[in-house]
Image (cartoon, rainbow, N blue to C red):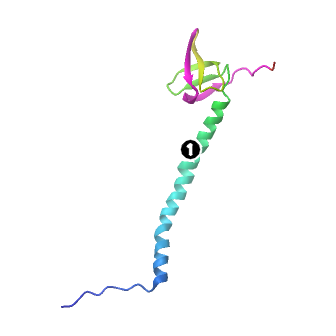
Amino acid sequence: MITPAFAQTAGASAGGMDMIVQLVPFLLIFVIMYFLIIRPQQRRAKEHQDLLKNVRRGDTVVLNGGLIGRVTKAGDEPEMEIEIAEGVRVRAVKSMIAEVRAKGEPVKAA
């Protein structure tokens, strides 16, 4: 009856080093994901928020659904009025704006 022999680790300090070596690839993957995925997405979201804040009357906008129209009424509320054809006005949520194609006339000082 011979029992199998198992190799012993060199000491307690080697076990801590093995743990660090195993965590390095996970940390490296997280850093790469941050710079390639998370950071650019946050930058695009900030740019979109700035775009939504600066939308004003007369801007030509493209909505996420593909509609193109001219803003006729904009304000601080989450909805705006967009003219998609002559005499046809629709209300749309500001967050649905995909891009601003042409800027309208600046607001006249009163």
Residue 73 drawn at (x, y percent): 64, 18
Was residue 102 drawn as part of the magenta stretch in this picture? yes
User: Is 108 rendered above or below residue 37?
Assistant: above
Residue 15 drawn at (x, y percent): 45, 79
The magenta segment is 87-108
Q: Quadrant of residue 68?
A: top right
In the image, 100 versus 10, the foreground residue is: 10
**Going by the image, does 82 lie left or right of 16?**
right
Furthest-bottom residue in view?
Answer: 1
Secondary element type, mark 1: helix
Was residue 11 drawn as part of the magenta stretch in this picture? no
User: Is 7 rendered above or below residue 102?
Assistant: below
Q: How many marks?
A: 1
Furthest-top residue in view?
Answer: 87
Furthest-left residue in view?
Answer: 1
Residue 66 drawn at (x, y percent): 51, 24
Q: Which residue corresponds to the image point at 44% horizontal and 86% vertical from the top-left? A: 10
- The residue singled out by tag 1 in the image is 41
Furthest-right residue in view?
Answer: 110
Q: Residues within 10 Å of mark 1 (few under 14, many from 20)?
A: few
Q: Which residue corresponds to the image point at 78% horizontal and 19% vertical from the top-left? A: 108
The image quadrant where one finds the C terminus is top right
Question: In the image, what residue type sits under mark 1?
Answer: Gln
